[in-house]
Structure formats: C-alpha cells, structure tokens
Image (tube, rainbow, N blue to C red):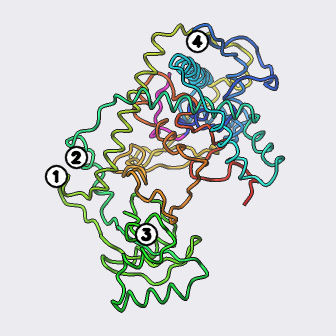
Amino acid sequence: MKKLSFAKSLASVGLAAVCALGIVGCSEQTSDTPTYTGGVAATVNGVEIPEDKVTQAIQDIRAQMSLTEEDAWGQWLADNDYTPESVREEIVNSFVDQELVKQGGEAEGITADPTEIDQYVETMRGHYDSDSAWAEALEAVGMTEDEYRDNIALSLVSQQLQEKVGEGAAEPTDEEVLESAKTYVSSYDGAKKSSHILFEASDEAQAQEVLDKINAGELDFATAAESYSKDTASAAEGGNVGWDRLSNLVTEYTTALADLNKGDVSGLVTSTYGIHIIQCTDVFEAPEELTSLDQLPTEFQDSIRTMLQSSNQSNAYYTWLEEQRNAADIQINDMPEGLPYYVDMVNYSKTETSTDGTGVTAVDADGNPITLDEGAADGEGEAPAEGTAEGEGAEAPVAEGVDEGAEGAEDAAAAAADEAAADAEGAAPAGDDAAAEQPTEGAADGAQPAEGAAE
C-alpha cells in the first residue's frame, strides 16, 4: 500500500489516519450505513470487513474535505498520486489494522474501561450547549454516539497495547541523544526560560505593589512567587515555567517575554489567566558546533530523550503490528464496480507544481492547496513537540489550548505520521493514543469539534 509521507501531502496522513483521528465514522457498520455495492472487502482471521463500511468511510472523507464533486475528487486524487483503487487499499488496510488491534487486545486480555469512555464522551459533549448541537456535530462527521464510543474504546485498547508492546523498547543512549540534538540545536537558539507570578485579574493593586518591591530590591522574585502566585504548580519552584520552546504559552506572555533579556522583569502583563509578572531567567545561545550534551540545558536533553524513547516505542508497536499482519489470515477481495468514489483517472492529470526545490505542494484538511517549506516537510531542523519534557509547563496556567479531554491526541497525530508508521506496510490503527476521542480535525489543539459548539 502507499507509504505515509507528510512531505508528499498533508492528506497522505489524512486518508489512512482520519480514522485514527476520529475525523469520520470509522467504527462498526450500523443499520444506518447506506447500501452501495454490498459484499465483503476483506476478512481478517475470518472476521469480515463489509465493502459498504469501506465505501462509507471514503465518502465521509470526501465530505470532510469538500470533495463531493466528481471533478474535484478526481483532480485531488491526481494531484496527490492516488487512484480510487489505492484509496480503497489504504482504507481497507486501516480497517484490517483495526481488527488486528481488537484481536490483539482480546488475546492480551486488554479492555477499555467504560468509565473512561464515559469521561471522554462527556468532555467532548461539554463543548456543546445542547444535546441537539452535539448530535448535529456527530452527524456532520458521519457517526453516531455509539460509533463514537466504539472509536474511543478501540483507541484505549490500542493505547494499552502500545504501552505493553513498548515496555521493552530500548532507552536512547547519550550518543543517540547527542546526534539527534545536533539536528535540533539551531531551533533552540534564542530560547528563553522564565518564571512568573500570577495574580487574579481583580488584584491589580496588589500585583503592582509586589512589582514595585521587586524592582526596588525589597523582595526576591522567587520568594514573591512562592508567597503570592495563584499558579501553585510553578510557585513551588519559585515561579519557574520553563523554556518557551518547550511550552505552549499564551500570546500575551510570549510577547512580553520576547522583550526581556536575562534577569529582566516585565511590567504587569494581562492575559486570560489573570495578571502576570514575568522574569526572564535564562537565554540559550546555540553553539556553532555541538560536541557534548553538557552544552544543552537538561530540559532540552530530556525533551529529545523523551522524543527518541517515544519513537522507539512506536517502532516496537509497528513491528508488533506488522508481525500480526504477517501471522494473520488476511484476504482482501478485488474492488467491485459501481462504487460512488470511482472516477476514471484517465480524465485527470497532476497539476504542474514548482520544481525549484523551494517548497512542496500539499493540501489542507479542506482540500485547498498550500505550500510546505521543504525542510519543514522533511522534519529537518524542527524541535521536538512542545511540552515533551516531562513536567515542563504541564500544569502552568499560561499553557495555551490545553484541553483535558484531548490528552494524547497530539501524540496520536505524531504517531500516525511517524517514520515507523511510514515504513510499516499497514496504516496506523484507528484510535492510536486515544485519538478517536476527537470527532473532527483540529481537536488535538483543543479546538471545538464543529460549528455550534458552545463558546
């Protein structure tokens, strides 16, 4: 099947991983599933995957990407090196992997906790101001609440399987961390570490009094944080919220921090969390040549080490999944005629794109063309995901876009595009790392699932 390649197209993550990300209804076929051609697309150890289930998934993807018109769909396929046959193959393989995950979970005695499923559903439902708005959001992405629950259940089983399989993954060595750090070190250049004291929005007078005492040298910043800050998590560490490159900080905070040099203290900074007094405690200057981990702050080392460990665990999981595929009795049947997503590709040719090496043409989630920076598309020089260092800013109220109901979704998206997944024969199974909790795109960032969600 097609290998996943983010550099080729954002949608290459989309087709096989939309099920994993819960963007469309990729769970069990129900009585509401339309009848298209009938028949069986594949069997996995005797378990049938209905052709109509595959067809409906593809139709839902088309609807999500605004590609319901035949010509728009055909052109998108051509531009992204797909055919109706390869799309079907990719989706069938994703359903095969889902079934292997189910069967693997059963063999290991792994089940999803109903209470945890309820919590995920209630968290997402809480984004909507009425039951009807919630039902409309589910309908818009082609699933019922029962299907949504099935996706979450599979997600949780998959997550537990990954943890179990990844238990024996090798920990990265210092040499491996150093080699990886050489790739990322330039992206850390200019990073700033900071501490803050957080006051309620109504406590401006007290905030100003504390600031005046700090500026006059009458009060130590760390002591003031411990005594006055409403952010109890960072207050215990003298207000430390870590490095800006490893944390999601609200815009007002980062804007103020950008103007500070090491040792500087800001004025009163107002954000949605209240009033901040910010101190820049360190600035990192990347060395011309990185030869030792000692040249990096420990937080950066930990972040890279965590990223590599996660990659090793992902590799172990995808190796396990590939072994399951090889050992399973999998029968994939020929593509039937009369499918609604079929178009004759002889009528479509790939749109001319830039060949000067300055960028990679792709499409966004709505099917609109965009241009990716070639280095970014290949993942060169990018820092590991924000907040990967354990405990780094995890509880700070300055974190932007935090959504408890979305925990694990970013990890799932990363896993879907992981190099190990790219090299695996099968696509990432639906619901990796609890990703299926999100019924639409963007949810990994805590975004509202669909229009009509409560503000």
Which comes before the other along the chain, label 2 or label 4? 4
State yes or no: discs 2 and 1 in contact (Cβ < 8 Å).
yes
| Tag 1: amino acid | Ser
At a point 38% along the width and 63% down the height, the residue shown is 242
Gap between marks 4 and 3 measured at Cα: 54 Å
Disc 3 vs disc 1: which is toward the camera?
3
Disc 4 vs disc 3: which is toward the camera?
3
At a point 60% along the width and 32% down the height, the residue shown is 77
List the residue tagged with mark 2. Answer: 178
| Tag 4: amino acid | Val
List the residue tagged with mark 4. Answer: 44
> What crowding class fits label 1: few (fewer than 14 Cα within 10 Å), some (14-19), or many (20 or more)?
few
| Tag 2: amino acid | Leu
Gap between marks 3 and 2 measured at Cα: 32 Å
Gap between marks 3 and 1 measured at Cα: 32 Å
Q: Which mark is residue 235?
A: 3
List the residue tagged with mark 1. Answer: 292
Give the residue at the far right of this rendering: 132
Gap between marks 1 and 4 measured at Cα: 50 Å
| Tag 3: amino acid | Ala
> What crowding class fits label 4: few (fewer than 14 Cα within 10 Å), some (14-19), or many (20 or more)?
some
At a point 38% along the width and 67% down the height, the residue shown is 240
| Numbered disc 4: secondary structure | strand
Q: Is residue 45 within the magenta segment?
A: no
> What crowding class fits label 2: few (fewer than 14 Cα within 10 Å), some (14-19), or many (20 or more)?
many
| Numbered disc 3: secondary structure | helix
Q: On the rendered structure, is 154 left or right of 268? A: right
State yes or no: discs 3 and 1 in contact (Cβ < 8 Å).
no
